[in-house]
Image (cartoon, rainbow, N blue to C red):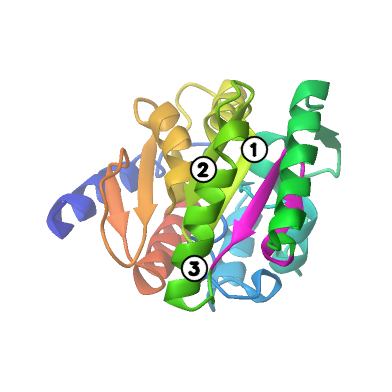
Amino acid sequence: MQQIQTKSVITEFLDRLDGSKMSALLLDYDGTLAPFHTDRFKAVPYAGVLPLLEEILRSGKTRIVVITGRPIREVQALLSPLSNLEIWGAHGLEHAMSDGTYRQIAIDPKSAEALAAAEQWLRAAGFISLAEIKPGGIAVHLRGLPDKESISVREHLEKGWTAFADQPELKLLQFDGGLELRVTRPDKGDAMAAILRTLGPDAPAAFLGDDLTDEDAFSVLEDRGLPILVRPEYRETRAKAWIKPPHELIEFFEQWLSRVSA
């Protein structure tokens, strides 16, 4: 994708904000709002992001929603002092409304049993220290490991978790920095579909994401709004535009703010 195409697509979308009473800014967290960090609890947003999002919220013309693979409680802590945000966590398994209302989709007993067995496999293999146990899934983080060790652990995981991933109720996801075994549904596309059902048909909506797990949401949004890939390097994607963090990300938020504040 050429940068000139990206700019024209984004400008055309932002023009729609000028006459809109309400819009939706939908955001992934890791790799999008915040750079990756070997300690995931220190992956704070890029400088300048939170004040801009706060100003966009204050305009009263934009609904901001975070759609992330993280548990909601982690994202809320990292976005502090920005609060009262709507967040879909664990790929859509958790949902917290801006008023604090919380809901978690229960997973079926068979899936829970398979995930418990996968966790036991991790403990036996000696990888539990790399694991993050989440609602409906287990993520193994490889970022920060020496290359040789990272490759070895990944290969061991892919082989050991194959039996679990072959079950229809579970899937093995590759993400930037590791692997995750989780329930097949919901995914970020399901969260996106639920959000779009609550928006007016004319409300402009954009989703910014970076990882392969964001492609489900890109796919749902592509005929309804603007999916945007946020990465330093381009990759094949269903997104319609590509911006590089942090400078182009900040610029996008600044332009959004100027449109909804006019």
Side of 135 where 165 appears, left or right: left
Say which of marks 2 and 3 sits in front.
3
> Which kind of residue does numbered mark 3 sit on?
Ser
Q: Within 10 angstroms of label 2, few (less than 14), some, or many (20 or more) residues?
A: some
Q: Magenta includes 135?
A: yes
Residue topped by disc 2: 173
Tell me where residue 77 sits by quadrant: bottom right
Q: CA distance from mark 1 to mark 2?
A: 8 Å
Out of 180 and 90, give the one closest to the viewer.
180
Tell me where the magenta segment starts and ends, as one range: 129-142
Expressed as whole percent of the image width and height from the top left, the position of residue 125 reads: 69, 57
Give the mark nearest the N terminus, 1 or 2.
Answer: 2
Residue topped by disc 1: 182
Side of 122 where 99 appears, left or right: right
Out of 231 and 184, give the one closest to the viewer.
184
The C terminus is located in which quarter? bottom left
> Which kind of residue does numbered mark 1 sit on?
Arg
Expressed as whole percent of the image width and height from the top left, the position of residue 64 reads: 60, 47
Are the two marked residues, 2 and 3, in contact with CB atoms closer than 8 angstroms?
A: no
Tell me where residue 172 sits by quadrant: top right
The numbered disc on residue 194 is none
Q: Residue at (74%, 32%) from the top-left corner?
A: 114
Expressed as whole percent of the image width and height from the top left, the position of residue 136 reads: 73, 37
The numbered disc on residue 150 is 3
Say if residue 191 shows up in the picture.
no
Out of 135 and 23, give the one closest to the viewer.
135
Side of 26 where 109 appears, left or right: right
Give the mark nearest the N terminus, 1 or 3.
Answer: 3
- Magenta stretch, main secondary structure class: strand
